[in-house]
Image (cartoon, rainbow, N blue to C red):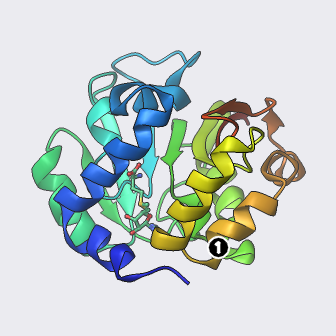
């Protein structure tokens, strides 16, 4: 599935960013969208934050305003090159999220936005395990991603978006019990907070 628009969104940053901004209108705009997963977290300038699957730094730019210890990780050297230019205040690591080159118990917060829907089910389980490993005891995994809309009016928008820009893994995520997977790994999981007619979920899970 997906269309040429998916390739364009990864090839041209202006295209990705404008589509993101457009989609973020459903929650009141991009600035609000980028704050959703950060609500209720205690973050100061020393907090060790990992922005997992950071892309070109779209969320990293907000994280560096809160802490001076932000690392962005992504598998795409192309995206990381852009992130280094866009958000030079963070450090970056090229790696797969399912095999992170970090010691155990390193981060206070692992943040990931709109990336888990790109993972195959087995990969997703490995990533959750890895996040648990690299978090300090008491550290928090906070994520924002797609969710099955609870308001039927939002079904059309989500379906069109997924058909144009996403692959089968995004549809799979809608059927995935993320809180259940997190709890199985050992996290204490909050009930997902839903936005945009239920089409977006924020989950915060504590190690
Ligand atoms: C939709 S983008 C999200 C970018 C950014 N977090 C945001 O909020 O806009 C998903 C990112 O996940 C990265 N990615 C996909 N699979 C990955 C993996 N297995 N390990 C690390 N990064 C991965 C892609 O390279 C891409 O930059």
Ligand 1 resides in the quarter of the picture at bottom left
Between 59 and 91, the one lying in front of the other is 59
Between 149 and 103, the one lying in front of the other is 149
**Residue 47 in the image: above or below residue 164:** above
What residue lies at 62% left-to-right and 52% top-to-bottom?
A: 131
What residue lies at 47% left-to-right and 71% top-to-bottom?
A: 164
Between 17 and 42, the one lying in front of the other is 17
**Residue 37 in the image: above or below residue 149:** above
Q: Position of residue 102 (x, y in %)?
A: 48, 57
The residue labelled by disc 1 is 169
Residue 22 placement: quadrant: top left
Residue at the left extreme of this rendering = 85
What residue lies at 68% left-to-right and 42% top-to-bottom?
A: 153
What residue lies at 80% left-to-right and 41% top-to-bottom?
A: 187
SS at badge 1:
helix
Q: Is residue 169 left or right of residue 39?
A: right
Residue 20 visible: yes
Query: Circle 1: is it few (<14), some (14-19), or many (20+) Cα within 10 Å?
Result: some
Q: Is residue 121 left or right of residue 96?
A: right
Q: Position of residue 193 (x, y in %)?
A: 71, 29
* Quarter of the image where the N terminus is located: bottom right
Q: Is residue 184 left or right of residue 54?
A: right
Residue 125 visible: no
* Quarter of the image where the C terminus is located: top right
Q: Position of residue 177 (x, y in %)?
A: 84, 54
Residue 34 placement: quadrant: top left
């Amino acid at each position: 599935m997906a269309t040429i628009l998916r390739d364009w969104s990864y090839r041209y940053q202006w295209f990705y960013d404008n589509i993101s901004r457009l989609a973020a209108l459903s929650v009141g705009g991009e600035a609000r969208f980028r704050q959703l997963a950060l609500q209720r977290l205690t973050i100061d300038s020393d907090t060790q934050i990992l922005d997992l699957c950071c892309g070109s730094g779209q969320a990293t730019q907000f994280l560096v305003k809160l802490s001076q210890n932000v690392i962005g990780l992504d598998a795409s050297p192309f995206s990381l090159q852009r992130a280094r230019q866009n958000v030079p205040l963070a450090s970056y690591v090229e790696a797969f999220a399912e095999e992170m080159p970090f010691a155990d118990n390193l981060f206070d917060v692992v943040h990931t936005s709109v990336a888990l829907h790109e993972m195959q089910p087995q990969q997703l389980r490995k990533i959750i395990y890895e996040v648990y490993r690299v978090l300090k005891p008491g550290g928090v995994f906070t994520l924002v991603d797609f969710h099955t809309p609870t308001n039927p009016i939002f079904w059309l928008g989500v379906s069109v978006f997924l058909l144009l820009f996403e692959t089968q893994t995004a549809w799979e995520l809608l059927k995935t019990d993320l809180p259940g997977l997190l709890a199985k790994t050992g996290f204490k999981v909050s009930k997902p907070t839903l936005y945009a007619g239920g089409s977006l979920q924020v989950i915060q899970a504590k190690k």
